[in-house]
Amino acid sequence: MFSLNHYSDFSGTAVACQERSISWASFYKELVDCCQRIAELRRSKHRAIIIMHDEDLAYPVYVAAALVSDLPFVPICKTDPEHKTKQILNKIGSGICIDTSSGLIKTFERKALDVPTIPASTAYIIFTSGSTGDPKGVMIDKHSILGFVDWFNSNFPAMPSTAYSLSASYSFDLSLMSIFPFLANGQSIWRLEKGEANELPTVPNSLKEHNIHWVSTPSFMQLKLLNKALNENSIANIGVFNFCGEALSIQLAKKLKDRFPKSRVFNSYGPTEATIAISTVEIEQPDQQSFNSLLPIAKLQYPLQLLDSGNGFELQINGPQVMSAYLGEAILNTPDIVNTVSKEPVARRYKTGDIVDLNKGHIYFKDRADSLVKYRGYRIDLSEIDAILAEHQHIEFSKTLAISKDNSIIRLVSFCLSESPAFCENRVKTHLSKRLPQYAIPSEIRLVDSIPISKRHKLSTAALLELG
């Protein structure tokens, strides 16, 4: 992945969408040209390669060029707020900028008195927030990418002529779950184009004979399944469904098993801070594998560790896939070494803030630690409300939010997606009352037509709050 020779012998289709495709021969030619232009412009003061993108098909070429050129890449979406882009550029200071639409490559330099350290081992920096505050740059090392690829290839079935679907924004690290295996294994990428939320995905002609490894958030698939024509008759060659970025619900897993009985469904987990994903569990029998209406995300084994949080367990990740640091903060431990006495790995550690359950050696994601709210003097776990709603026969999906005014919570609202004409708010509240105290029952059960998702293809709580 880090040398030009790695890409020279790959053949067939590299990247394709409905309208056009890039062969591996063209991919390699563009890669060589891009690396040459970077080498001509590069100076010792340059710290990173900024990749300014929209949804261009050639984006993986520039990722490969950055890896080969041994400069960390930093994706920035052209539609991001201007102040966020300026903040990121100021933190990088000096580097090379690539416009994926035009192919223009140029240098940039910001007049900053002090710029944070970027370790030489850094492969990429993903900025995880910043729509209202200061964006946080997660620095991931080269060896962490190799660890991720090894994990990926060991945990998912190998299929001949694989095409990894890619639907997320390139600024969301879920896109790298498709890009890195594609680059490492010399396979193909199916770039899904923007369209109506429930528009039927169409496999490009150049990939019709490929086996599809579908990668997306559960929310994105939930929207696609609103189109009842989406099943194995419309797309017969999906071998794997691989979901990450959010919790996979029992209802969604069952719907997929019903519409795609020959496909295998995997529930993957991992924060951006641990190189995309760190664990996965195949969901073969959703009802039998569930615990407290949750599906497993991992077995309890290294690199995962449970910490007593006072409200269940908080998940900690140890090991070489953990970031070196947030840009501008103290560098974490060096990559894994082995304790010469105990023979146990001494590793980087990252406390995720994710609260989980443990049952029969499997870990079940409940919610973020910050899902606990204090309302009318009572501590309420919003994830518990959603877990009970998930058991209701007429509810496909739910998200309970605390509605605030003047920094005080004024009510709880559960937003529910249902395809059943029998859906009834009062009956849903009765269902909740059998398991929850009266103070924890949301004042409103609101039926929504679809699930609003963000640019990162996760549930947009901000959009839901606007409805509230």
Image: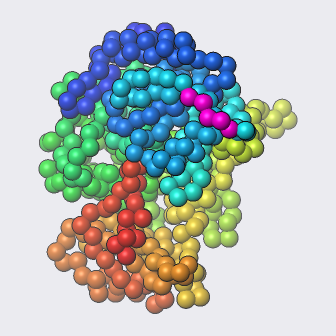
Residue at image point 21% right, 50% down: 196
Q: Is residue 449 magenta?
A: no
Q: Is residue 111 magenta?
A: yes
Specify the farthest residue to the front. Answer: 111
Q: How many marks?
A: 0
Residue 242 placement (x, y as % from top left):
38, 43
Does residue 241 show up? yes
Residue 424 horizontal/vertical position (percent): 24, 82
**Going 17% across and 27% down the picture, which residue do you hit?**
205
* Part of the protein shown in magenta: 108-112
Q: Quadrant of residue 19?
A: top left
135 above or below 210? below
Q: Position of residue 182 (x, y in %)?
A: 41, 26
Please indicate whether residue 230 sits to the left or right of residue 454 in the image: left
Relative height, residue 317 to residue 449 (above, below): above
Q: Residue at x 61, y 59 (%)?
A: 353
Res. 320 in view: no
Residue 180 appears left or right of 101:
right
Tell me how the rendering is colored: rainbow
Q: Nearer the viewer, residue 79 or 219?
A: 79
For the C terminus, the quadrant is: bottom left
Q: Nearer the viewer, residue 171 or 167?
A: 171
Is 405 above or below relative to 38?
below
Residue at left offset 67%, top offset 27%: 121
Q: Does the magenta stretch mainly form a helix, a strand or a loop? A: loop
Residue 347: x, y in percent? 72, 40
50 or 412, which is in the foreground? 50
Looking at this rendering, what residue extends furthest in the right direction? 341
